[in-house]
Image: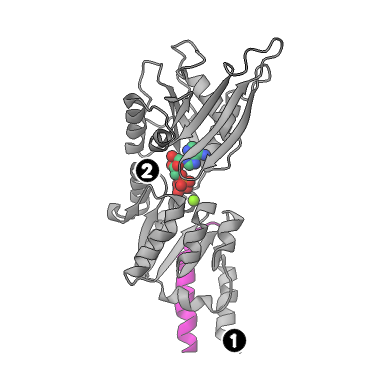
Amino acid sequence: ATPTAILVGTGRGAQLGVLIRGPEILESTRRVDTVVLDKTGTVTEGRMRVVDVWGAGTRQPPSVAAPARPVVQPVEAPDDANHLTDAPDVLRYAAAVESLSEHPIAQAITAAGRAAGEPDTETPLEVTGFIAHAGGGVEGLVRRAHSGLALGGALNTRRVLVGRPAWLADQGVTVPAEVRAAVGQQEEAGATAVAVAWNGTAGGVITLRDRARPTSARAVAELKELGLRPYLLTGDSAGAARVAALAVGIPEADVIARVLPAEKATVVARLQAEGRTVAMVGDGVNDAAALATADLGLAMGTGTAVAIEASDITLVRGDLRAAASAVRLSRKTLRIIK
Ligand code: ADP
Ligand code: MG
């Protein structure tokens, strides 16, 4: 028979915004000493917005400050079928491909494209052969559909890739030093930046920003007060990760960045191999394996169904402080029945 105190404990959890899969979960919750926090959508809101679009053909370097509204730098180079140089085209082509992806980066680029008038009804861009590469970027064949006389198909079609410079290079794309530098500079400033390439050369950079959830810093402080050690885990760059970590009180030494989706679970297993009892908090499809590997998986209620299904606990309101509530509740409940 299930002790009444545990049922009361799980019932109290529901009031605190903590949905616990079953009474047995309280025991693993009580034992946790390490908590790995996914960055995007868990510590941060996961709602990125485009703050800068830069075409390598424009003279000015990308602006590093984060303006309130999306900025598309002026066109300074003529559009050419083979060279991706002007910012409006960088945004248009990237948005066309990203509209087929659901990643937070893709949602932001699609929204910025829409704000800039994409899809354009006169010369709509058609995308075929779309592929999303987890932890790397997206690609697709973008065709400019002209009304009237059609131009030669091959001339009119560009293989567009949007993603991390290192991933682009792995795909055989040439990434000029200035593009690599522009991405690096944005990342050092705490932003997320992706490069845009077509027909084999990267020529644009799109910079995005996300922000910490207002309750994240308090949640990290509460987890530390409970004696847990928080880590930040992300596929994003070290720069963007460091800025997010410092904003919520996680030391730089406990930031694990540029982790491929398939490797998030490996990071959790490595901490377990050190003898720790690990809780993982995440929201994405990317986090599912890590959530299942952890001694305790907690999903943001605002996250994907896949993450929620892989977890033991759901933080219903998407408030990270509920993770600390769960730990406190498990300690109190199990003290009563002992
Ligand atoms: P996170 O852990 O922050 O959710 P991901 O593993 O999903 O990160 O992605 C890691 C990196 O891969 C991103 O920072 C970005 O550079 C690149 N990337 C992933 N998906 C996309 C996409 N749809 N468009 C552009 N870049 C992407
Ligand atoms: Mg996430």
Q: Is residue 194 magenta?
A: no
Quarter of the view holding residue 95: top right
Where is mark 2, residue-wise? 237
Taking the spot 44% from the left edge, 66% from the top edge, the residue there is: 279
Q: Amino acid at mark 1?
A: Thr
Taking the spot 35% from the left edge, 22% from the top edge, the residue there is: 61
Asked whether 136 or 68 is in front, the reply is: 136
Which of the labelled discs sits on residue 2, or is there none?
A: 1
Q: Count neighbours of disc 2 (C-alpha within 10 A) and say few if under 14, some if 14 to 19, many if 20 or more.
A: many
Which of the labelled discs sits on residue 251, or is there none?
A: none
Which stretch is magenta?
A: 316-338
Q: Amino acid at mark 2?
A: Ser
Quarter of the view holding residue 66: top left
Asked whether 216 or 63 is in front, the reply is: 63
Tell me: residue 190, above or below residue 306: above
In percent of width and height, residue 213 lies at 47, 50
Q: Is residue 215 visible?
A: no
Asked whether 248 or 2 is in front, the reply is: 2
